[in-house]
Image (spheres, rainbow, N blue to C red):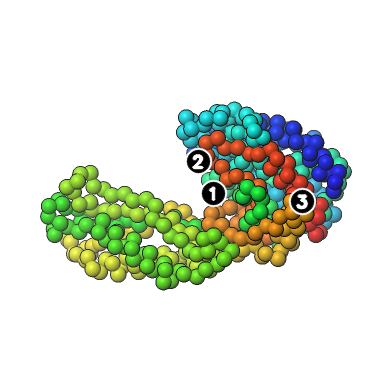
């Protein structure tokens, strides 16, 4: 094991060069107007094809929005003592740079090294994880060390926009790639000292509620129905309903409760003296696994019906106010990865031995691609050592984190029970 760790240290400069080369290739997701991952995947394939992987599969998904008309997914295999697989899944796509004037260290796709950090769009998300997994694998290959399980490095497309062309496609169209005896690591979330292991996530519901009233001149409110007033009372009533019906606590998560926050509002009024005919509220809800999205949607309807009864008017045979519900995004959380699963226990041991830390195991409010593994019954953890600067201007990856995370990945490759 020491030889492998020494090899990783030796590869430190190469890792920095590799990350910078990857950043230089914009792989902005086509959903956000970019060219996609084709050029980046081609570069990566040309880098690793001579390393000695036992197999490299390329699974292309058609998408006419992307350069080359394809969204590539690369799977690189190192055969282990066991056919049970250890997946390390990272993603090739990045988000747009955003406000260019906010990039004060360098331009988004012109990486630089300063103060032990590599700056550029995609440096942390997910370039660090990509490079750490690569140099961990290269260290094993260079030293001729056989992993305990068959290692699969998966470099996938489309993580930033739902994974339809990435891991979602692989699970849907190539289910035979996955077995319930597999385990997975997703190095795409973490804390600055690497002391948090994510094993669970909340369900996500983004929902737009359109409350329809009756537009009228503001000087004659009695002739119409003001949806603002209905919406204001509705928001307060939803908060009370959540306290009563969704008060269950799960200490895996922070916060340990279901949350449902109004985040956006919109109305059709174009003048101060017009009572609008419609008021929109968008909610971002993060539900504990113990709570169902369908139940919450029904509860929202019940709250509205109760509030609406106080304002009810009939106009041309129709009753007002009316409620329209549009689900913008929905992701039902899979069962958590058991805290006593082999991937969790081995990762905890790695962090204790290599970093002398006792990690905390828990859940998060956001969604990750680990959910795709968990829905298959495959234990998956999300872990890395990052400062959480993804999607920000001046995004960076610390060079020491790249190297030290690679050592943890190599430890898992060599020590996961077959």
| Image location of residue 240, percent across then percent down | 37, 67
Q: Quadrant of the C terminus?
A: bottom right
Left or right placement of residue 105 versus residue 178 in this view = left
> For residue 114, which quarter of the picture?
top right
| Image location of residue 254, percent across then percent down | 54, 60
SS assignment at label 2: helix
| Image location of residue 359, percent across then percent down | 68, 57
Which mark is nearer the camera, 2 or 3? 3
Of residue 104 and residue 80, the one placed in the foreground of this image is: 104
Residues tagged 2 and 1 counted as in contact (Cβ below 8 A): yes
Q: Which residue is mark 2?
A: 31
Separation of disc 2 and disc 3 at Cα?
A: 40 Å
Residue located at (28% from left, 49% from top): 267
Q: Which circle marks residue 162 in the picture?
A: 1
Q: Tell me which label, 1 or 3, sits earlier in the chain.
A: 1
Residue 74 lies, with reference to residue 263, above or below; the image says above
> For residue 16, which quarter of the picture?
top right
Residue located at (62% from left, 50% from top): 190
Q: Which residue is mark 3?
A: 354
Residue 134 lies, with reference to residue 308, above or below; the image says above
Separation of disc 2 and disc 1 at Cα?
A: 10 Å
Residue 63 lies, with reference to residue 261, above or below; the image says above
Left or right placement of residue 399 versus residue 329 in this view = right
Residue located at (32% from left, 53% from top): 280
SS assignment at label 1: loop
Q: Tell me which label, 2 or 3, sits earlier in the chain.
A: 2
């Amino acid at each position: 094991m020491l030889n492998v760790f020494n090899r990783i240290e030796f590869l430190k400069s190469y890792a920095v060069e590799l990350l910078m080369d990857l950043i230089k290739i914009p792989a902005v997701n086509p959903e956000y107007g970019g060219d996609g991952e084709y050029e980046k995947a081609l570069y990566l394939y040309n880098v690793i094809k001579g390393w000695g992987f036992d197999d490299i599969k390329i699974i292309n998904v058609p998408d006419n929005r992307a350069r080359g008309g394809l969204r590539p997914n690369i799977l690189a295999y190192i055969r282990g003592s066991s056919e049970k697989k250890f997946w390390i899944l990272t993603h090739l796509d990045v988000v747009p740079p955003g406000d260019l004037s906010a990039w004060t260290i360098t331009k988004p796709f012109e990486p630089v090294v300063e103060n032990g950090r590599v700056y550029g769009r995609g440096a942390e998300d997910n370039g660090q994880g990509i490079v750490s997994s690569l140099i961990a694998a290269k260290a094993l290959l260079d030293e001729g060390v056989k992993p305990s399980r068959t290692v699969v490095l998966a470099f996938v497309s489309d993580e930033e926009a739902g994974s339809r062309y990435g891991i979602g496609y692989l699970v849907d169209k190539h289910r035979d790639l996955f077995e319930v005896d597999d385990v997975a690591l997703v190095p795409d979330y973490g804390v600055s000292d690497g002391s948090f292991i994510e094993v669970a996530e909340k369900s996500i519901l983004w929902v737009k509620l359109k409350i329809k009233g009756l537009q009228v001149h503001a000087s004659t409110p009695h002739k119409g129905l003001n949806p603002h007033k209905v919406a204001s009372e509705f928001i307060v009533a939803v908060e009370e309903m959540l306290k009563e019906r969704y008060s269950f606590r799960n200490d895996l998560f922070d916060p340990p409760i279901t949350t449902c926050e109004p985040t956006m509002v919109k109305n059709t009024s174009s003048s101060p003296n017009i009572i609008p005919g419609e008021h929109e509220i968008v909610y971002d809800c993060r539900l504990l696994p113990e709570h169902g999205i369908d139940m919450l949607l029904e509860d929202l309807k019940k709250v509205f019906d109760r509030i609406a009864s106080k304002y009810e008017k009939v106009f041309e045979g129709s009753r007002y106010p009316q409620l329209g519900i549009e689900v913008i995004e929905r992701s039902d959380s899979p069962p958590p990865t058991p805290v006593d699963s082999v991937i969790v226990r081995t990762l905890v041991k790695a962090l204790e031995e290599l970093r002398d830390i006792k990690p905390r195991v828990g859940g998060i409010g956001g969604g990750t691609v680990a959910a795709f593994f968990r829905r298959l019954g495959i234990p998956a953890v999300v872990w890395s050592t990052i400062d959480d600067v993804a999607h920000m201007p001046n995004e960076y990856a610390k060079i020491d984190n790249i190297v030290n995370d690679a050592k943890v990945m190599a430890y898992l490759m060599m020590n996961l029970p077959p």
